[in-house]
Image: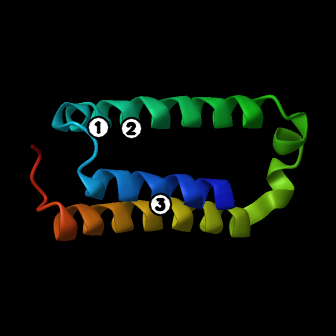
Amino acid sequence: MWSIVGALLLGIILGRSGLLPEKIFTWTEKITVIGLIILLFTMGLGIGGDPQVFNNLDSLGLQAFVLASGSILGSILIAWFLQKRYFGGEKK
């Protein structure tokens, strides 16, 4: 967990420091999207490859569905808010 937080903080520090060439920032959105696609694909492989997930789907119930849906919705809302608040809501 701390390695993830550390990587995020390092990225923020490098991004704000001015040490990186401007050209690298034109690629950040594409790299982020590709990384997310790879992450979601590998998570899907892990879930699909685990027979216990599908065997216990009926016992997971409404609570698991609500927690998963809340996490997804919360992530979307926070990302939208941050985009509007700190990045002007406009695509560059």
CA gap, disc 3 to disc 2? 16 Å
Residue under the point 19% across and 71% down: 85
In contact (CB < 8 Å): disc 2 and disc 1: yes
Q: In which quarter of the image is the N terminus?
A: bottom right
Q: Which residue is identified by label 3?
A: 9
Q: Which of 84 and 87 is in front in this view?
A: 87
Numbered label attached to residue 32: 2
Q: Which colour scheme is used?
A: rainbow
Relative vertical location of residue 30 with respect to residue 10 in this rendering, above or below: above
Task: Name the side, left or right, on which 54 lies relative to 7.
Answer: right
Q: Which residue is drawn at 59% across and 29% down?
A: 41
> Mark 2 belongs to which amino acid?
Thr
Question: Tag 1's secondary structure?
Answer: helix
The amino acid at mark 3 is Leu
Quadrant (top left, top right, bottom left, bottom right) of the C terminus:
top left
Task: Give residue 14's position: percent from left, percent from top.
Answer: 36, 51
Which residue position is annotated with label 1?
Answer: 29
Secondary structure beneath dot 3 equals helix
Give the residue type at disc 1. Glu
Residue 55 x/y as whole percent: 89, 42
Residue 62, compared with residue 15, is above or below; it is below
Observer-nearest residue: 2 or 41? 2
Badge 1: how crowded within 10 Å, few (<14), some, or many (20+)?
few
Disc 2 packing (10 Å; few <14; some 14–19; many ≥20): few
Residue at (86%, 58%) from the top-left corner?
Answer: 59
The CA span between labels 3 and 1 is 18 Å
Query: Which numbered tag is attached to residue 20?
Result: none
Q: In the drawing, does residue 28 fall left or right of residue 60?
A: left
